[in-house]
Each structure stands twice: as structure tokens, then as C-alpha cells.
Image (cartoon, grey):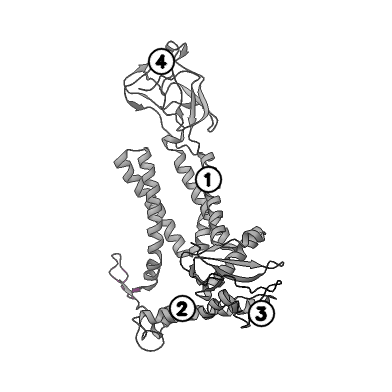
């Protein structure tokens, strides 16, 4: 049973702006961490941070209105109270008759709800959690007087409106702009429409199931917004393609009001267009052209061809690095084109894979280090690029030369001296004084 409200008892609003700002900062921080992990740069990185900030702000605002968020004191019951009924020596507060002063909204504002069965001077008695006309709630009351009787509304309750319109507008622009950069305008608009529709649908369903204004309704709206945004983004490309194919034909001289003079048809897709050169809008995409060109190959053969092309590209990049950086050696000692025999001879007999000659240290002893090779050129260039990004972001060589981990086997080789075989799940890249990579090799036994 709620406590009785009295003159001077405080009122409070949802902590919307503070939670919005916290959500914005947390969302942006998570996005920055994601950018740092994946190494994204340029406009895409800015867009990721913008999207994270906008999403975090929206979640923060939505969650600030839930019961666990509490209320920020923004004023008190002021000006008037019952002239002859007192609770703990303070004038009892009544719905409709008594006013509150709120720092978030101008003018005296009436208490808008009260008890449905207990009346003071003919007006519903006000209690803790009763609402005011600006959607604030009474947050504190008597410590030993309680009033039940359900709740009745006596005055209009306006939305809290604690966030200026320009803030919502700015967040919308940032969120949509970020989505356009990351996914394109069609997917961005589809996701936006789906999010709004899903949010309204979730709020409607949540209100029916959990009750209007309940936490369950608000969680339903959030879940509906996320689900609707996802489905809208997924459906947008197909819907846009379908819309472009719709043709509207009006029969001349038959304009009517029932639409019977209008015919709708679908233009053929590029794959069904037969004969001659298809119009520009229906030409095959580059991907479809390649699929048709190599349609005689099996799925396994196509994958092998793609992997071969990617390996060639990575090998060319490694070769270019070796030629542009003095003293660099990537392919000759640790590249995928080296053999296990070469790696074994280096680990056991000290024979350099590049020169074919044994190597000795300054003391004249044979050098038999661990000797490893990457399983693919792509893994080697991947390790170099990841380490280089770490160096660029931190400016610290020691961080860049930390092991780079892979999710699968990236290399193989032999332990120095013993010649024992092992695989590698990580690699290391070394840099010169100019912050340029000079070698990259798998680390045996790493997982």
C-alpha cells in the first residue's frame, strides 16, 4: 500500500538525459574497441563509432524509464495542500486540487492521479507513485500513514519530454548516416522502417501482455525494434529490386476512378531476359557473370581456383614488401613456397633455405633455430598487416612484436636441434628501426 503524500514531499522524473548520455558514451566506447580489434580505419571507423553511440543513446533513453532506473528529484508538492487534513503535521496532498513545482516543466502542475476510494476534501488522496500532469511521480511520503483504494486519474498526463527534439534529430541523423556508410541507403532505410514498425508492434503486444507502461511493455518495444530493424534490413534489397521491376501502364482515354484502366506488370530479371543485349538495368552483375563463366567447374574446383588466385595476390604483396624494405625476408625463409625438407635442414643442420649454405654464429657454432613455414601466403600477409596496424595505433614496437594468434593452424616446422615436428597457431612479426616489418614466422606449439 502506498504512503500518503504531503505538502513538500518530493517528485521525480526518469533520469532520461543522464542515461542517454551514459548509453551514448558506452556505445561509442564499445564501437571504438571493436574498431581497434578489427583494425578498421577511415570513414568506416567513424561510422561504426557513430552507430554505436546512437544505438547506446537510444537504449539508455528507453531503459531510463523502467522501474529499476529510479527517479531524479526534480521538485516537490508546493503551494497548496489540504486546509484541514494533516499527515505527520503536514498538509495532506490531493489529486487535481494541489500543485507541484517541477524544474523540468514550467508553471504549477496538478497532481493528476490519486486514490480511487479515499478522498480528502472531496478529492482523491495523493500517494507515493501517483503521477503529476508532467508525468513526474511522487517519490516520498509519510513513513507511517498508507492509503490504498486503487488509482483514478483526474487530470491530463503529458509525456515527460525530457530530451530536446534537436537531440533526437541529431541522433537520428548520426544513426541513419552511419548505417548508409556501412550498409548503403537501401538497407539503411529498410532497417529504419523495420525498427520503427517493430518498436510500435512490440509496444502494442507488450501492453496487451504485460500492461500499459510496464517494464515488460518497454522490453517488448526494444526487442521489437531490434528484430524489426534486422528483418527490414534483410528484406530491403529484395523489396527495392522488386519495386524497380514494377511497371505501371495506363490505357489511353480510359481514365477512371476505380483503377480498372491501370495495369501493373513486372519487367523480366536479368537472368530471364532472352536474346540480344539486355538493357542496362537488367545486365548481369559481375558476380553472376563469373558464376556463369565458371559454371562448368564443380564447387570444389571453383573454391580451389579462388584460393589459388588469392594466394597469388598475397604472394605478389609479400614480394613487393621484400623489394621495398632493405633486409626484409618473408618468402625465402618462412614463406608457403618453402618445403618441410628445407625447414628440417635448417633446424637440424643449420642450412639457410635462401642460400643453401650452413650458417654459424660469431662463436663459430652451427646455428640450428626453430624453423617454420606458413601454410599460406595469405596467413603470412595477414600476420604482417595485423602487427603493422598495432604498431601504427600504439607506436610501440614491443606491442607490435607480440604473437599474432590465429583460429586455426597457420604454420608448421621443426624444433631446432631435435628436429621434432609441430604445428603453429600463432605468428610473430619483427620490425626494423623505421617501423617496417622485416620478417614474419609461425611460432611452434602455440595455441
Q: Residues within 10 Å of mark 1 (few under 14, many from 20)?
A: few
> Is residue 112 left or right of 435 when viewed as pictured?
left
Write down the residue under mark 4. 144
Q: Is residue 239 visible?
A: yes
- Look at the image and say whether residue 251 sits in the magenta stretch: yes
- Chain-order first, disc 3 or disc 1: 1
Mark 3: give few (<14), some (14-19) or many (20+) Cα within 10 Å: few
Q: What whole-number distance in Å separates the C-alpha atoms at marks 2 and 3?
A: 24 Å
Magenta residues? 247-261
Q: Pointers 3 and 4 in contact (CB under 8 A)?
A: no
Considering the image in quadrants, where does the N terminus appear? top left
Q: Which mark is residue 165?
A: 1
**Callout 3 secondary element:** helix
Q: Residue at x 53, y 45 (%)?
A: 165
Residue at (53%, 54%) from the top-left corner? 31
Task: Say if 327 sits above or below 399 in the image.
Answer: below
Secondary element under disc 1, as helix, strand or loop, is helix
Mark in the foreground, 3 or 4:
3
Q: Residues within 10 Å of mark 4 (few under 14, many from 20)?
A: few
In primary-sequence order, the first of circles 4 and 2 is 4
Viewer-closest of 122 and 441: 441
Residue 86 position by quadrant: top left
Determine which of the numbered discs, if any, sits on residue 323 in the image. Answer: 3
Per the model, the C-alpha gap separating discs 2 and 1 is: 52 Å
User: What residue is pinned by disc 2?
Assistant: 307
- How many marks overall? 4
Q: Quadrant of residue 427?
A: bottom right
Amino acid at each position: 500500500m502506498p504512503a500518503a503524500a504531503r505538502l513538500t514531499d518530493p517528485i521525480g522524473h526518469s533520469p532520461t538525459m543522464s542515461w542517454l548520455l551514459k548509453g551514448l558514451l558506452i556505445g561509442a566506447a564499445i564501437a571504438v574497441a571493436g574498431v581497434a580489434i578489427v583494425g578498421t580505419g577511415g570513414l568506416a571507423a567513424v561510422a561504426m563509432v557513430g552507430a554505436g553511440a546512437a544505438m547506446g543513446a537510444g537504449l539508455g533513453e528507453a531503459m531510463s524509464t523502467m522501474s529499476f532506473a529510479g527517479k531524479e528529484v526534480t521538485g516537490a508538492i508546493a503551494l497548496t495542500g489540504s486546509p484541514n487534513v494533516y499527515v505527520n503535521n503536514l498538509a495532506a496532498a490531493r489529486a487535481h486540487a494541489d500543485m507541484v513545482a517541477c524544474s523540468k516543466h514550467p508553471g504549477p502542475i496538478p497532481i493528476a492521479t490519486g486514490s480511487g476510494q479515499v478522498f480528502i476534501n472531496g478529492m482523491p488522496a495523493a500517494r507515493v507513485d501517483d503521477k503529476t500532469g508532467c508525468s513526474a511521480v511522487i517519490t516520498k511520503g509519510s513513513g507511517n500513514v498508507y492509503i490504498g483504494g486503487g488509482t483514478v486519474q483526474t487530470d491530463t498526463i503529458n509525456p515527460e519530454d525530457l530530451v530536446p527534439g534537436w537531440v533526437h534529430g541529431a541522433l537520428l541523423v548520426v544513426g541513419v548516416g552511419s548505417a548508409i556508410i556501412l550498409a548503403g541507403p537501401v538497407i539503411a532505410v529498410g532497417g529504419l522502417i523495420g525498427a520503427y514498425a517493430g518498436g510500435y508492434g512490440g509496444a502494442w503486444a507488450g501492453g496487451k501482455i504485460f500492461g500499459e507502461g510496464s517494464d515488460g511493455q518497454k522490453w517488448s518495444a526494444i526487442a521489437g525494434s531490434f528484430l524489426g530493424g534486422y528483418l527490414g534490413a534483410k528484406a530491403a534489397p529484395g523489396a527495392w529490386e522488386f519495386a524497380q521491376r514494377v511497371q505501371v501502364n495506363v490505357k489511353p482515354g480510359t481514365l477512371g476512378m476505380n483503377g480498372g484502366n491501370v495495369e501493373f506488370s513486372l519487367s523480366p530479371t536479368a537472368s530471364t531476359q532472352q536474346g540480344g543485349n539486355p538493357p542496362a538495368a537488367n545486365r548481369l552483375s559481375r558476380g553472376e557473370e563469373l558464376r556463369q563463366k565458371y559454371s562448368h567447374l564443380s564447387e570444389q574446383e571453383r573454391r580451389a581456383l579462388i584460393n589459388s588466385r588469392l594466394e597469388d595476390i598475397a604472394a605478389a604483396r609479400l614480394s613487393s614488401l621484400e623489394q621495398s624494405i632493405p633486409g626484409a625476408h618473408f618468402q625465402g625463409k618462412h614463406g608457403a613456397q618453402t618445403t618441410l625438407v628445407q625447414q628440417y635442414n635448417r633446424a637440424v643442420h643449420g642450412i639457410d633455405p635462401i642460400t643453401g649454405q650452413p650458417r654459424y654464429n660469431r662463436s663459430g657454432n652451427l646455428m640450428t633455430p626453430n624453423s617454420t613455414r606458413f601454410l599460406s601466403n595469405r596467413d603470412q600477409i595477414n600476420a604482417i598487416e595485423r602487427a603493422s596496424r598495432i604498431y601504427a595505433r600504439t607506436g610501440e614496437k614491443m606491442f607490435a612484436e607480440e604473437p599474432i594468434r590465429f583460429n586455426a593452424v597457420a604454420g608448421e616446422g621443426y624444433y631446432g636441434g631435435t628436429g621434432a615436428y609441430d604445428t603453429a597457431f600463432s605468428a610473430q612479426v619483427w620490425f626494423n628501426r623505421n617501423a617496417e616489418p622485416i620478417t614474419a614466422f609461425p611460432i611452434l606449439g602455440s595455441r
